Amino acid sequence: MTTSPLILYDGVCNLCNYSVRFVVKNDKKRVFKMASLQSELGQQFLAKHHLDEKSFSSFILVDKGKVYFKSTAALKVVKKLNGLVKLFYIFIIIPPFIRNFIYDTVARNRYKWFGRSDVC
């Protein structure tokens, strides 16, 4: 795929698209590459890892051959960004089942709360 860390996200979710724009704005060194889960690259990744190719509820980070999902992926991303936002990485000390409960609640309601678009 790519040697740069790759972020895979739901391309029609307004919250996800805002998050990607936030990463782009705060990724001064241009570390990250990005693709929607609906894209050809995203679909290839899901198929390769035997994940549901129609489920776009997880934020995914692929970095140095490792795959991170949900809150862990988001925290690994903020750790590499510029500015004070990297302080959010402190939340990595919270057990994943707690972080992902919050993540899953937001993911389940993201279209209702933030809307969706027809395209990324």
Image (cartoon, rainbow, N blue to C red):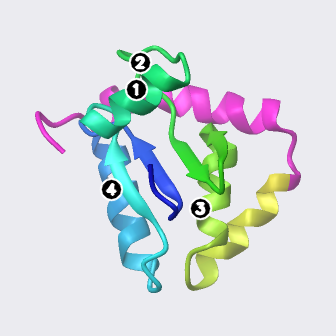
Q: Residue at x 39, y 67 (%)?
A: 22
Q: Residue 74: horizontal and vertical position, in percent?
A: 59, 52
Residue 18: give its label: 4
Asked if residue 102 lies in the magenta stretch, the reply is yes
Q: Residue at x 46, y 14 (%)?
A: 52
Q: Which residue is mark 3?
A: 77
Quadrant position of the C terminus in the picture: top left
Residue 56: give its label: 1
Indicate which disc, 2 or 4, sits on the residue closer to the N terminus.
Answer: 4
The amino acid at mark 4 is: Tyr
Instruction: Please state the extent of the stretch shown in magenta in the rendering.
Output: 93-120
> Does 5 appear above or below 117?
below
Choose between 51 and 55: the one closer to the eye: 51
> Does 1 appear above or below 102?
below
Q: CA distance from mark 1 to mark 3?
A: 18 Å
**What SS does tag 4 mark?**
helix
Q: CA distance from mark 3 to mark 2?
A: 21 Å
Local crowd size for mark 2, using a 10 Å CA cut-off: few (<14), some (14–19), many (≥20): few
> Does 17 appear above or below 86?
above
Local crowd size for mark 3, using a 10 Å CA cut-off: few (<14), some (14–19), many (≥20): many
Indicate which disc, 1 or 4, sits on the residue closer to the N terminus.
Answer: 4
Question: Could you tell me if residue 108 is visible in this image?
Answer: no
Indicate which disc, 1 or 3, sits on the residue closer to the N terminus.
Answer: 1
The amino acid at mark 2 is: Ser
Residues tagged 1 and 2 counted as in contact (Cβ below 8 A): yes
Q: Is residue 100 left or right of residue 37?
A: right
